Amino acid sequence: MSIANSNTSVRFRGSFLRLYSYLLAHTPEPAVLRDLRHETALQHAGRERNQVAPEQGRFLAWLLETLGARRVIEVGVFTGYSSLAMALALPEDGCLVACEKDEGPLQLAREFWRKAGIAHKVDERTGPAVESLEMLLTEGHADSFDFAFIDADKRSYQRYFDLLLKLVRPGGVIVVDNVLWYGRVADPEETAKATVALREFNAQLLNDSRVSFSTVPVGDGMALCRRL
């Protein structure tokens, strides 16, 4: 890389960081969410990217408020940032079904659900998410949810999505995180299983007559899918 190109790259990174700092400064984030984000960095150092960014959390909350959602499913909880952001946006009698297989980070999620006073809104389902979603169908919850959010095992996205289309009502919304996968989906030399699975999922969405969708470059890319 030439010196000129190197300087341009440094300036670009600097501009991006300034812009992102500006975005964060203008993103509403309740103190309890900010505290959870910091505690996650302390207790789960190196895994912070498993939680959504503040602007994504606010976007999810805004969507729920705009849709008037009351019943939500989350596939992939980690330490609970996105579930907390969404539960805070739900009405007092709202319900968020939180599907997570990893007991470790759930402990922190539970702690902050209690701190925020929204634990009564959370229906926790531990174990493999596919089994949890199938159980919800068995329990008679088909077509009863207003909103769903997927942020879990990338290789299972299609299975989650197909099950959620049975659980979310017509007109309901499914949001899928990480569909841009840090740019890897656009790199033909990237052949990791998760990357390939996301490429296949994104391609399938283009021809899926069950939904209308739009991909937005918020965070690591979010596909917004409305069930038809």
Image (cartoon, helix red, strand yellow):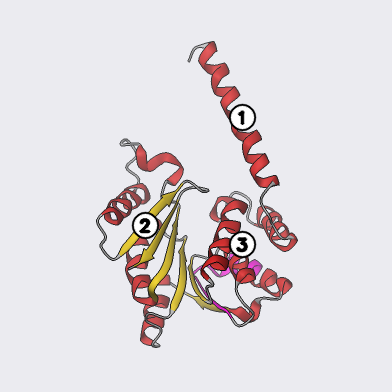
User: Disc 2 to disc 3, how far (Cα)?
Assistant: 24 Å
User: Disc 2 to disc 1, how far (Cα)?
Assistant: 31 Å
Q: Which residue is mark 2?
A: 213
Sooner in the amino-acid sequence: mark 2 or mark 3: 3
User: Which region shows up in magenta?
Assistant: 94-109
| Three-letter amino acid code at the position of disc 1 | Ser
151 relative position to 121: left or right: left
- Residue 26 is labelled as none
Residue at 51% of width from left, 16% of height from top? 5
Secondary structure, mark 1, is: helix
Q: Are marks 2 and 1 in contact (CB under 8 Å)?
A: no
User: Disc 1 to disc 3, how far (Cα)?
Assistant: 27 Å
Q: Nearer the viewer, mark 2 or mark 1?
A: 2
Give how far across and how far down residue 151 sits, in percent.
47, 60
Q: Nearer the viewer, residue 224 or 104?
A: 224
Give how far across and how far down residue 227 sits, in percent.
35, 68
Q: Are marks 1 and 3 in contact (CB under 8 Å)?
A: no
Answer few, some or many: residues within 10 Å of disc 3's Cα (few below 14, many 20 plus, some between 14 and 19): many
Q: Which image quarter: residue 18?
A: top right
Give how far across and how far down residue 123 sits, in percent.
55, 80
Secondary structure, mark 2, is: strand
Sooner in the amino-acid sequence: mark 1 or mark 3: 1
Q: Which residue is mark 3?
A: 81
Secondary structure, mark 3, is: helix
Residue at 41% of width from left, 51% of height from top? 215
Q: Nearer the viewer, residue 7 or 148?
A: 148
Q: Nearer the viewer, mark 1 or mark 3?
A: 1
Q: Nearer the viewer, mark 2 or mark 3?
A: 2
Residue at 56% of width from left, 57% of height from top? 59
Q: Is residue 42 above or below residue 16?
A: below
| Three-letter amino acid code at the position of disc 2 | Phe
Sooner in the amino-acid sequence: mark 2 or mark 1: 1
